Amino acid sequence: MTIRPGSAFVNAVGSVVAVLVALLIGAVVIVISGQDPWEAYRSLAEGALGSRRGRAETLVYAAPLILGGLAFAVAARAGMFNVGIEGQLVIGGFAAALVGATDWGLPSAIHIPLAVLVAAIAGGVWGFIPGVLKAATGAHEVITTIMLNYLAFRLIIYSIQRRSDWLPVDDSVQGTERVLDTARLPIVLDATRLHAGVAIAFVAAFTIWFVLFHTTFGYKVRTVGLSEGAARYGGIRWGMTIAIAMALAGALAGLAGAGESLGLHGRHSAVPPGLGFTAIAVGLVGRNHPIGVIFSGLLFGLLSAGALTMQAEADVSRDIVLVLQGLVILAVAAFEAMNRLPWFRGLGTPKTPSGGDRASDTGMAPEIESRPAPPAI
Amino acid sequence: MRDVVKRFPGVIANDGVNLAVRTGEIHALLGENGAGKSTLMNLLFGLYNPDEGEILINGKSVHFHNTRQAVEAGLGMVHQHFMLIPRFTVAENVILGNEGPDSILDRAAASRRVAELATSYGLNVDPDAKVGDLPVSMRQRVEILRALYQGSRILILDEPTALLTPQEVDDLYVILRRLRVDGGTIIFITHKLREVANVSDRVTVIRRGKTIGTRVTSETTSQELAELMVGREVLLRVDRPPATPGETILDGEDLRCTGAHHQETLNVASIQLRRGEILGVCGVEGNGQSELVEVLSGLRKPDSGTLTIKGQDVLGENATGFRQAGVSYIPEDRHGRGLVLDFPLWENALLGNTERPEFTKRGWIRSGWIRELTSSLMARFDVRAPSASTPARSLSGGNQQKLIIARELQRDPDILLAIQPTRGLDVGAIEFVHRSLVETRDSGKAVLLLSFDLDEIMDLSDRIVVLSEGRIVGEFKGSTADRAQLGLLMGGRPSEPAMAAA
Amino acid sequence: MAGITRLNARMNRRRVIAASGGTVLGAAIFGNLSVGSAQESDVTVTMVTDTAGVGDQNFNDLAVLGGDRAAEELGVTFNILESQTQADYSPNLAQGGETSDLTIAVGALLGDAVAEVAPQFPDKFFALLDGVVEQDNVYSVVFREHEGAYLGGVLSALVSQSGILGVVGGIRVPPVARYEVGFVAGARTINPDIEVLISYADSFEDPALGQELTLAQLNNGADVVLPIAGRTGVGSFDAVNEQGEGFWIMAGDTDQSHLAPGRQLAAIRKGVDVAFFDAAQAVVDGNFPGGTVDDLGLVEGGMDIYAFDATVDQSMLDTVAAYKQAIIDGVIVPPADDDALAAFVPTPLDGAATPAASPAATPAS
């Protein structure tokens, strides 16, 4: 294996190192706040991994983050910064719950797939809109996805408060009515909350990996994301590609919402869960690689699941986990930036096998900067 | 430098290099892109440590662990990409890192010292000018000044002419000779034979990380150096049998484009490509070349006109449609267009080929087949890279260009659009590209060569058209074209003395 | 327990302010409380917050107040588990079920999770504040917020110079809706022409938005604003602070005068802390009312109102006290929802003070 910046291997090592650094800094924060970091991390790990239930909880927390992380990764591969995962997720979750709470007398074998499909479509539409807007008008996706987040939140609240006449919603809990048993994703491990939606996340990750790296569509997405000029040159339709990629991203986020509604909570609640924003971090830490997203999703899930035990046993505020998550993101970003620094590249990862004599030709970063200290004149 | 070896994972960048530079000479270090020249200089300058061998300065073995030690030993380096702070003045940049012991910076004194130094070497730079306002050639002088200010007696210049105009290059030569007169030693890294002949006293050629030989410049020829550099016999001028033009395969009439401000950017009354012929398009940059190329490759739809390929109307098709009609296109912008730098070579081989059944099958990429194809193309077109999985970014410009040519010719096109195909390439690669173009022509295909290098156009074209302000203002048979006449037409004002482009 | 200890200190200080600065209205206040002396108990009580968490200056903090008192007076061990997301409710409640005798869920949104977790721990007790779950080991408490809010509306209308009041809501969940409706009804009783501006932030966790909405109301003429918005309501205090003299805040759920010193007219008190304490006491005493639902209003002492500012003079206090008695006596039934409000006929009591905004106002001395 060639070691070079940007390779999957270096990225993976980078993320692992970044996580370790974040845990180290997190320990300092815990010490400063007057607690025992060892005890905190021990209870965190024990809570997340020490029991059957804890491991199930880790997976339960990880599932929407993995799907959301994929939603970020797919968009990012197409060169789009998808800040709209939260909106895509809640609109998907809401749609799934509406379908799930409606009694058509459907058997599970139809009701579940239908609700899941509707969630994917709803999320997909929510992703497709900013994609099309960018393709057609150049409207920046960060703006439009943020707008669509609010639109989703408001639409859901409006529906819950004003449309109880024909929608299965319940304003006393600010959510939909409970999803019927025929639409609930089954629990796959007794006495835990581990539902079948978790499997959807893993299947989706491997599917996306395959789509991105082994299909023409994935190739087009990646080409568009890396070089608009090359895509045009290669006859790839940029607008179409980003619009479809965004729709796919939205559908993945919608699936995350479906898992929460149909699997975990049994209804969709109007309070935005914030998962869509954590998912951005999951995507970044996973380096926008589907397999990387699995691991970073599991990491973030582990932190969330373990945090409950940590606050109960080690008496460390649950907020410290938010600090840890923030630190992980910072550390990954810092590592990424470091990767671009010439001295760092030169240190561990010489830039090219044969040394680019002409940086302008090879597109390499400029040569090493040297600022020698003064000799006496 | 004796028997210096530097290894990087997977490759030996310098393999027993010997370089002996005498005090007070201009020594050219000549080699193709990727031959190991920069690595060697980085070793000398303390940026890397050699794995084997030793470096001696004035007979003393030295071991630099950082650049500071190298500077203290009297070395100075002028990089290809300047390490200057644009918002600082010349004087501030020059003394950066040498501010002296006082915490208060005496700008006036610094400026004076820098001015004296500049004058004494004929560098003619205003010490109080902001670096950001200076042209490239002046910034280079600031770099040289800084090295001198640091007390450098051995100056290393890495490809110093890459960004300079011919006039500026001549000025640089004058400065270098002046430095030599004052006892300075100069190592001049280049891959251009002309520069070696013009400025150096002696020249060392390295190839694939090895020293090939050192020559006294006045006792050698460009031909010999080129062969040393490339490792085989090189044709500095392509051998080109007379063309046998066949049928017209591409026919464009009345192609017009307008720009963002409604000004006409292209107005070509008539353009034809014929089988077995190289059509050279020359002109000064910005006279409708990119519009013409984009129209002919399907990237841009002209506002009016007709365009047929093999009798079929192709206007309205996109780039994919043009490809399917038999157009291959070597773009002028390797990085922005021709390649996705972060993709491995085999994925770059797929660019533009996604609709072809050999490459993809029902939406799946046939990666195994493409990898094999890429490997065989790499062998056939001499693309030097560890494997088909190497990212395109890590290839030298020449190898990147060869990959693009390999990909485009692999399509077995009827029409090849070659846009500035040798820009930034070294001798060996240029020869290869030129030979490929002629071979393509000889296999009965139509070639369009667009270049800003008039010599290249005249060397290769069977027919030449001159593009000026979007119009074709002249057409010549390749053999009858006259340089001066072309230059006049390119200038667009035949009544005045024309500026020859590039 | 460093985090919680610090919290205790803060809570205690606030309680002192409330006790010294508040004018208690009416006679029976929280009369059903038995004041226990400090004792030791091996009972463990765990509180699970909603996503607004500890520090919302509101509902959650009020519950913490009750927990602290239980720890102090009953000697129970009091733990808090904060929830960051909806997904945390279940595991937090389960954690509570595993480690404590009584787990108290704060907020209606935890209802689903309580219904899911409580059956897994049949020999442990659960309490749900502000919501109903009918299970044998779950004690549910809901409040008649509209009764307290009615009195808040009465007082606000008496004080208002402009005849315009404001309500800034978080999300219009039923308890919040009851606040809004009761407030409007009370205000209309005093001044039939009163205008009540109503804005919702659709979030309990957005103080910046709360501030914006409140400022908008103040700029539109409102001079007394009732925030019922959890942490969002903190922004309302900031807004009133910013406007200064002549503008008042009517606090919901609990006294928050430290957020806007001198600007808090009164606090509509919701007995969350009392309910919390009572539930803990019941476990200690061995008579936990599992399976029952308590609906607490003025008469039970579950709701009340405290005035905090000298602007509220004795005649106003008397008026409010009179309306309070009328509600306790069943003479006035404040509306609890939109339909009831639409059907509500304001019936002013004879001899009560008249609103300041009314041209015929004759301020009582």
Image: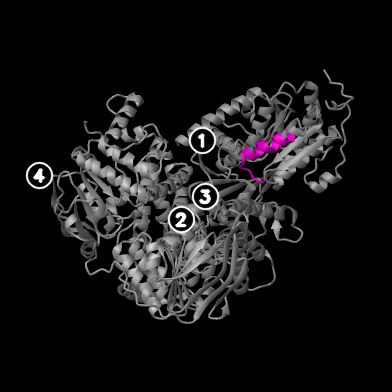
Disc 3 to disc 1, C-alpha distance: 23 Å
Residue B122 image position (x, y, % from top left): 29, 37
Disc 4 to disc 2, C-alpha distance: 54 Å
Q: Is residue A190 visible?
A: no
| Residue for point 55% across, 53% down | A83
Residue that numbered label 3 is attached to: C92
**Do callouts 2 and 1 mark residues in contact (Cβ within 8 Å)?**
no
Magenta stretch: includes residue C211: yes
Single out the mark in the foreground, 3 or 1: 3
Q: Judge by depth and name the residue closer to the eye, C310 or B27.
A: B27
Residue C148 image position (x, y, % from top left): 74, 36
Question: Do discs 4 and 2 share a chain?
Answer: yes
Q: Amino acid at mark 2?
A: Ala
Label whose residue precedes the other's in the sequence (3 or 1): 1
Q: Amino acid at mark 1?
A: Gly
Quadrant into which the C terminus of chain B falls: bottom left
Query: What is the quadrant of residue B179 in the picture?
Result: top left
* Span colored in magenta: C202-217
Q: Judge by depth and name the residue closer to the eye, C299 or B188.
A: B188
Disc 4 to disc 3, C-alpha distance: 76 Å
Q: Secondary structure at mark 3?
A: helix
Residue that numbered label 4 is attached to: B59
Q: Is residue B64 visible?
A: yes
Q: Amino acid at mark 4?
A: Gly
Disc 2 to disc 3, C-alpha distance: 83 Å
Q: Secondary structure at mark 4?
A: loop
Residue that numbered label 2 is attached to: B498
Question: Do discs 1 and 4 share a chain?
Answer: no
Residue that numbered label 1 is attached to: C75
Single out the mark in the foreground, 2 or 3: 2
Q: Chain of mark 1?
A: C
